[in-house]
Amino acid sequence: MKGYFCFNRIFAGVIVLLVMATVFFACSKSATDTANVDTNKSDNQTITAAADQAIVSGIYDDLFGIALEVGADASLNETGRKAHRAELAAKLGSCFSYDVDDVTVDQWPKTMLIKFGAGCADNTGRVRAGNIQVTYSGYFYYPGSVIVIKPLTYTVNGVVVTGTKTITNMSTANVYKYSSVVTGGTVKLDTVMVSFNSNTIITQTSGTATLGDVTDDIFSITGRDSLVYPLGISASITVNDADALERKLECPWIGKGKALVTVNGVTATVDYGNGICDDSATVDLGDKVKSIVLPR
């Protein structure tokens, strides 16, 4: 009988140890799986935000180019200069037109209404529709001038764009430079409304010898952006001087440079390439690489 009870005690002890080991390893496995899921979720959020940043920033960067090009046609960039109308119509589309509220020379401010009507494609296939209001406090190229751009009923490829983009001329005798601030920006990507704010510096790096011809203008862009999603998830974007983005005015896309996109402490890099005008970019996050196609 004594041996029987000893055996039962030993057997029970073994069972207890087995149960404890099973629970331990089950918990360990569950914690690991949870960590992997959380990591993948954070990575995917950052990669998605990086791709969205490339799309949204491109839309607002284009507003700068539109104001500059139309300003040249309307003699609002500097006194006595006027672009060739046929070139501008080809660049912005056949439906494009504009009105200026006051054509008196050197009388400021002036408000321009840029109209794309029901919409048309430009020479790259980008379809703009609706109206944009641009207010000039002075000539675009003159230091101290402030240009305020407001999309009114404006869409790009069917995407509704809102907010205010304020450009302040910070140029010196040797450098054409602008502060660009976007406030209250919103863009609907698929079914998600994304808020956008931006504070960047735009520096002209080529074309300053031919200011009357904007087709050869090249600009570098540095600074910070932010995206905020409906559930409160936010992304901060930084473009450092060493990796400045490059935009050729004749190209519809950023062709060079890198942007760092951070969501909840996880950072991905948007790489726009080495200067070739194309619609491709890559998002890099550790061992995860995603190729993206930039919209026209």
Image: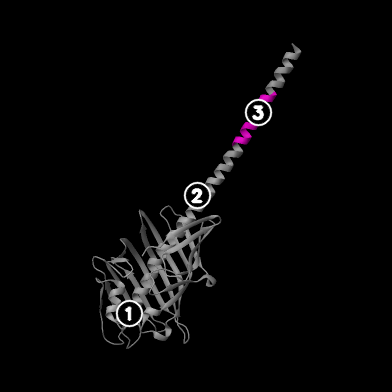
Q: Which residue is mark 2?
A: 41
The dominant secondary structure in magenta is: helix
Q: Sort mark 1 into few (<14), some (14-19) or many (20+) by Cα contacts within 10 Å.
A: many
Question: Disc 3 to disc 2, how far (Cα)?
Answer: 34 Å
Q: At which x and y percent is residue 264?
A: 52, 55
Check the picture and name the quadrant holding the N terminus: top right
The span from disc 2 to disc 1 (Cα, nearest Å) is 45 Å
Asked whether 14 falls inside the magenta stretch, the response is yes
Displayed quadrant of residue 198: bottom left
Pointer 1 residue:
71
What is the crowding at mark 2: few (fewer than 14 residues within 10 Å), some, or many (at least 20)?
A: few
Callout 3: SS: helix
Residue 50: x and y, percent? 46, 59
Q: Earlier in the sequence, mark 2 or mark 1?
A: 2
Cβ–Cβ under 8 Å for marks 3 and 2? no
Residue 18: assigned label: 3
Q: Is residue 206 left or right of residue 96?
A: right
Residue 5 sits in quarter: top right
* Left or right, residue 186 beside residue 289: left
Residue type pointed to by label 1: Gly
Residue kind at label 2, given as amino acid type: Lys
> Could you tell whether 185 is left or right of 272 in the image?
left
Query: Looking at the picture, how far across and down is residue 62, in whole percent?
Result: 37, 70
Specify start and end residues of the magenta stretch as a single range. Answer: 13-26
- The quadrant the C terminus occupies is bottom left
| Earlier residue among tags 3 and 2 | 3
Check the image and name the residue furthest to the right.
2
